[in-house]
Amino acid sequence: MHIEISGRSDSDAPVMVLSAGLGGLGSFWLPQIPALQQRYRLVTYDQRGTGNSPDSLPEGYSLHDMAAELAQALSEAGIARFDLMGHALGGLIGLQLALDYPARVKRLVVANGWLTLDAHTRRCFQVRQDLLLNAGVDAYVRAQPLFLYPADWLSANQARIEAEEALQCAHFQGMENLLRRLNALMSADFQLLAALITQPVLAICARDDLLVPWPCSQQLCHALPNASLRQMDWGGHAMSVTDSATFNSLLLAWLDATPVTASQDASRVA
């Protein structure tokens, strides 16, 4: 798995891992990196089967697999304990890591995530899947910004969107990989396990998210024992991109107000 490490290099620097959504690319977090690299040893990565981590994903590929792959890659990089911020699928990977490797995860930030898949979100994913299967990669990529960004932001950023579309088509992760990753995402359900995730969690959402309705973050927050909710009025599903200033401000304020406890540090693994 391709990972990149930036920011602080001192041996006792805290580590934050950034996990992208269905696109899988670490570059999704470019608007957050300058705000975080002064504080953290910062880890970004391309998820298996995407970007610089090319592979053919197996049948039955699951969220457990995604968490295990990341845990192994971090161990190989000498990283035992970390905070994690994830967007949508990336946030679900963080929740799965907290369940499967609880001693390694200190704090979680879940942006536009969910406890269980909402009926509206399922419909959106099914539409995107139908586009991919019946109209092809170009149509899938052209439709993707409609689910990610507010209409006014899209209207003002057409040149950027067209450049991103060309890049995504040229480096598409492959139909089989995308469908298997999408199936893993849609199958994830934390309803019966949320009470076991005791780490501090920030659930952050945008009220105008077309893909994941904002009450999904509220539901997730209520189910977790130690969670906080922050809402943005505008920004869409990719609000960390469209309004990075507000997103970064909310993120840093929560991190400052939510220290890792002594009991959590005492559970540090070697």
Image (tube, rainbow, N blue to C red):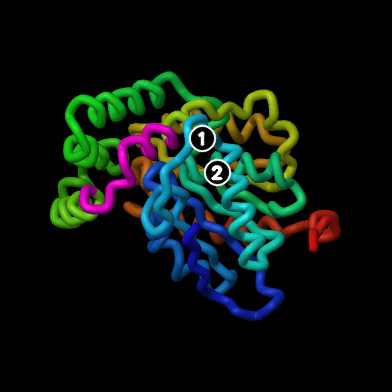
Q: Name which residue type carries label 2.
A: Met
Q: Which region of the structure is painted magenta?
A: 169-181
Among the 4 quarters of the image, the one containing residue 31: bottom left
236 over 270 or under it: above or below: above
Predominant SS of the magenta segment: helix
Q: Are marks 2 and 1 in contact (CB under 8 Å)?
A: yes
- Residue receiving disc 2: 66
Position of residue 185 measured from the top left corner of the image (x, y, whole percent): 48, 33
Seen from the viewer's position, the closer of residues 226 and 78 is: 78
Q: Quadrant of residue 164?
A: bottom left
The residue lying at 46 percent from left, 49 percent from top is 48
Q: Along the horizontal axis of the image, is 255 left or right of 23?
A: right
- Which residue is disc 1 drawn over? 61
Magenta highlight on residue 105? no
State whether residue 7 is above or below residue 264: below
Question: Mark 1: which secondary structure?
Answer: loop
Residue 233: x %, y % from top left: 39, 42
Q: Quadrant of the C terminus?
A: bottom right
- Magenta includes 178? yes
Q: Which residue is rendered at x = 53% and y = 43% of the image?
A: 91
Residue at the image position 69 percent from the left and 52 percent from the top:
105
Between disc 2 and disc 1, whose residue precedes?
1
Q: Secondary structure at mark 2?
A: helix
Residue 36 lies, in percent from the top left, at 52, 67
Residue drawn at the location 27% of the way across and 52% of the way down: 171
Q: Local crowd at mark 1 within 10 Å, few (<14), some, or many (≥20)? A: some
Residue 246 seen in the current view: no
Residue 46 position, x and y percent, is 44, 55
